[in-house]
Image (cartoon, grey):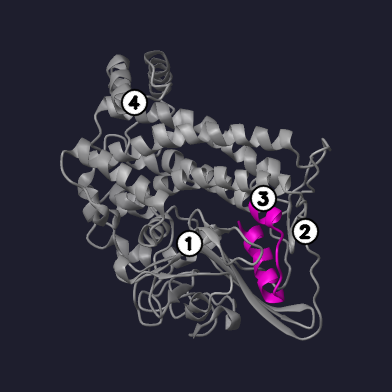
Amino acid sequence: MHALVSVRTVENALGMEVPRNAQFIRNMIMGAHGVHDHLVHFYHLCALDWVDIVSAIKADPRATAKLGQSLSDWKRNTYEEIKTTRDRLRALVDSGQLGIYGSGYWGHPAMKLPPEVNLLAVTHYLQALEYQREINKVVALLGGKTPHIQNVAVGGVTNPVNLDSPDTLNMERLYHIRTLMDKADEFVKKVAMVDVAVVGAFYAEWTGYGAGVTNYLSAPDMPMDTRGTEFSLSGGYIPTADLGRFTAIKSFDDEFFAKNVKESIKHSWYEGDWDRHPYDGETVPHYTDFQEDGKYSWVKAPTFKGEPAQVGPLANVLCMYAAGHERTRHYVTKVLETVSSLAKTKVGPSALHSTIGRIAARVVRCAVLNDTLHDQWNALVENISSGDLAYFNQPEIGPGLYQGFGFHEAPRGILSHWIVIENGKIKNYQAVVPSTWNAGPRNDKDDPGPYEAALFNNPVADSERPLEVLRTVHSFDPCLACAIHMFDPEENELVRVRAL
């Protein structure tokens, strides 16, 4: 969602307002992208750290179907579909060529799920491929393509609204979008939330591992007004896991956020040794090889109020929970009650400060986003029906110095861009992104970043196959391509892509 944040950044610097229709369209793209991303992360990037797909071929499909139907009234927990999955999986294993599953930790002593639970999870893994694709169509229909949307512009969007034209955003297209949202909604609430609770119950000990940094930072998002002062989703800062000390971030101009973000490069492969605000930041590569007590990462080390902060769905869910967000509290309670029932022990909100808690928070946020998507759809339709068809305000920039920032609660956490404009030209531009916050090395005070801190005291059953390390790092949904942004000032050609 860098495209969205980049235009918010310039709008902030120029002091612009954005039409409400444009806000709602942007919000729907953001929400659909988040639901898609969270489904992909749990099922296709993270679940197989906990689910042994090879073990699933030993399962009885009838017993698996009975188990699935006892957990949820999901219409596709049928014997026929589950048996088909088991047979396909058995053929794959018997072939001796596991393809993309070949490097998995099958049979690892840290794997605990019974065969029937593994088979149910694999069945839902395959189903999730369908539903993440359906919700991703919302992004494509509104954004022109996915993932790199084409419709956002400084001042609004490029989606003309005309209910009488088949070539613009009209009710037929909007109702089709609504059907896609409905499909995802059922899968999220009847399948994903249940599966995460089941994994959490069988691996309940993992609520004691992986907490790491418990300062949490998230952005408010889904603005409902033209200036970004009213939001559907809350954000803010929680120090040392103390929800009672939550401080809200209240607007796109929020000084509390703007003044407290810094980045350090003491342990990063960039020129110098400084701790600076993004407006003054630089990105000048200076590789020194690995230095255990010196520079050892391409990632910078962000801080908030001088401390490392964890970002992502857990931070977002905890901040919304602390802010009293009704839906967040509802889904947190629902997941924890399901885990408690399955584990036969009381599991409270404190369990969320953990590896498994990050995964649970992601599916809670997925459900909240899908509900909020429906709110945004209703708000857009009501606003258009009122006669407001505006979708773009023309930006104007004169001589002089401008600076501004934009933020967004992306799937991996708070994403912010920072710009300095002088006489119509960009003087400085820095991006402080979710995986930079979480993957950052030690800062100027040598405090470890969230990845490093979360690995302290994790168990490792087999040092030659450190599955547990992957479980904790994967729970953050890592993306180093997002964490590091560089360019070659010599403009050497690195790769050429030709469209056929």
- Farthest residue toward the front? 386
Q: Which mark's residue is nearer the viewer, 4 or 3?
A: 3
What crowding class fits label 2: few (fewer than 14 Cα within 10 Å), some (14-19), or many (20 or more)?
many
Are the residues flagged by discs 2 and 1 in contact, CB closer than 8 Å?
Answer: no
Q: Which mark's residue is nearer the viewer, 2 or 1?
A: 2
Q: Earlier in the sequence, mark 2 or mark 1?
A: 2
Residue that mark 3 sits on: 25
Labelled disc at residue 435: 1
In the rendered view, tell whether residue 488 sits above or below residue 381.
Answer: below
Q: Which of marks 4 and 2 is nearer the N terminus?
A: 4
Say if the magenta span includes residue 20: yes
Whether residue 54 is visible here, answered yes or no, is no
- Farthest residue toward the left? 345
Badge 1 element:
helix
Q: Earlier in the sequence, mark 3 or mark 2?
A: 3
Badge 4 element:
helix
Seen at 53% across and 37% down, the residue is 132
Q: Which of marks 1 and 4 is nearer the N terminus?
A: 4
Q: Give the range drawn in magenta.
A: 1-25
* Separation (CA) of disc 4 from disc 2: 50 Å
Q: Which of marks 4 and 3 is nearer the N terminus?
A: 3
Image coordinates for residue 408, horizontal then vertical, percent? 56, 61
